[in-house]
Image (cartoon, rainbow, N blue to C red):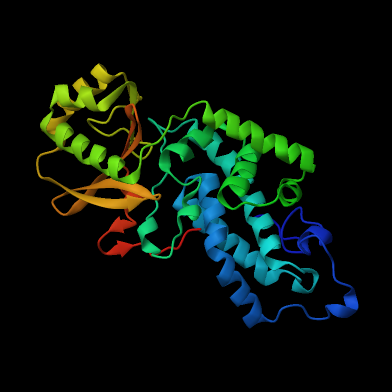
Amino acid sequence: MPETSATGVDGLSEDEASGGAVSPSADRPNGLDRPDADAVFAEVRPRLFGIAYRMTGSVADAEDLVQEVWIRWQATDRSAVRNPPAYLATAITRLAINTLTTARARRESYVGPWLPEPVDTSADPQLGAERTAALDAALLLLMEKLTPTERAGYVLREAFDYPYEQIAEIVQTSEVAARQLVSRARKRLAEQRHRPVDAGQHRRLLESFITAARTGDLPELERLFRADVVSYSDGGGTRVRGVAPIPVSGATTVARFLRAFAPRFWPGVTVDYVEANGGPAALLRRDGAVAAMVVLTVSDGGIEQILWQLAPSKINGFTDDEVSGRPVE
């Protein structure tokens, strides 16, 4: 665990810890008492998880980061913290930047494609549409191409509408540089995204894909795909029999791969349609146990990406007996 500073989070000055303004010492003899501090943290916890998850693409890493910030919050001299939400957002973002840097180094030895861990957004019935910004799996995968600091700026601005002045304080740069960070990130992501379809059409395409994939219907698969479709399969970083160790691309190639894959994979599989990352997903079970999750990236030109999550550890939050129940902002 990183060392905790006097203000509670490495790299935070007293002014930053206060959320940009330090109260005079006479006005802050004790700070928040324990019940109030707990209540403040509980209120902002969904946002902290939302920031950390969008930064790392991992539910487990996001939960670890939230727990780390909680521990540090308990040890912090809260009398120096004038704006607890700003302080906690700064803490989680800086820790997430460090975690993402380390995780990317680990993924260099990851066997096969790495895909973001899906999160159950249906668990929060109050989840507003605006909160799903920068949350879909395809965008999380694209954000892997951003630098950690670009990703932080993009997430804070696009998902949570933080002002550039505050983003600059969090990532320790000037406001002008923060605007440039977000602008670069937007441009890099926009270059690789097409016009999306509405939720109803997305669901229909997913259902049509599942039907064609399980029967190995080559003409129908090719009809559903864009010419440049890519299929990614995440086996959890280990070699899994029948799982492509590299992305498969091209409409005809992907369709033929799925036709060859069908007799080995689909017998005994049942399909449930669920909500993951704010969009439709297919949860596949074999003999009652979760076997995979399928998420599609679709545009008005057809299916662009097929994301096969085959690592049990990444989809156990969708099992009947282990629903995450985790609100995500």
| Residue 279 rendering spot, x and y as whole percentages | 36, 47
For residue 132, side relative to residue 245 (left or right): right
Q: Residue at x 35, y 42 (%)?
A: 198
Say which of 220 and 257 sits in front.
220
| Residue 117 rendering spot, x and y as whole percentages | 41, 46
- Determine whether 58 is above or below 217 in the image: below
Q: How many numbered discs, if any?
A: 0
- Determine whether 131 is above or below 241 in the image: below
- Determine whether 143 is above or below 256 in the image: below
For residue 53, side relative to residue 239 (left or right): right
Q: Residue at x 52, y 55 (%)?
A: 50
- The answer to whether residue 142 shows anywhere in this view is yes
For residue 102, side relative to residue 121 (left or right): right
Quarter of the rendering occupied by the N terminus: bottom right
| Residue 41 rendering spot, x and y as whole percentages | 60, 70
Q: Residue 205 falls in which quadrant of the image? A: top left
Q: Residue at x 57, y 59 (%)?
A: 48
- The answer to whether residue 294 shows anywhere in this view is no
Say which of 1 and 299 sits in front.
299
Q: Residue 172 falls in which quadrant of the image? A: top right
Say which of 49 and 139 sits in front.
139
For residue 321, side relative to residue 107 (left or right): left
| Residue 233 rendering spot, x and y as whole percentages | 32, 33
Q: Residue at x 56, y 49 (%)?
A: 159
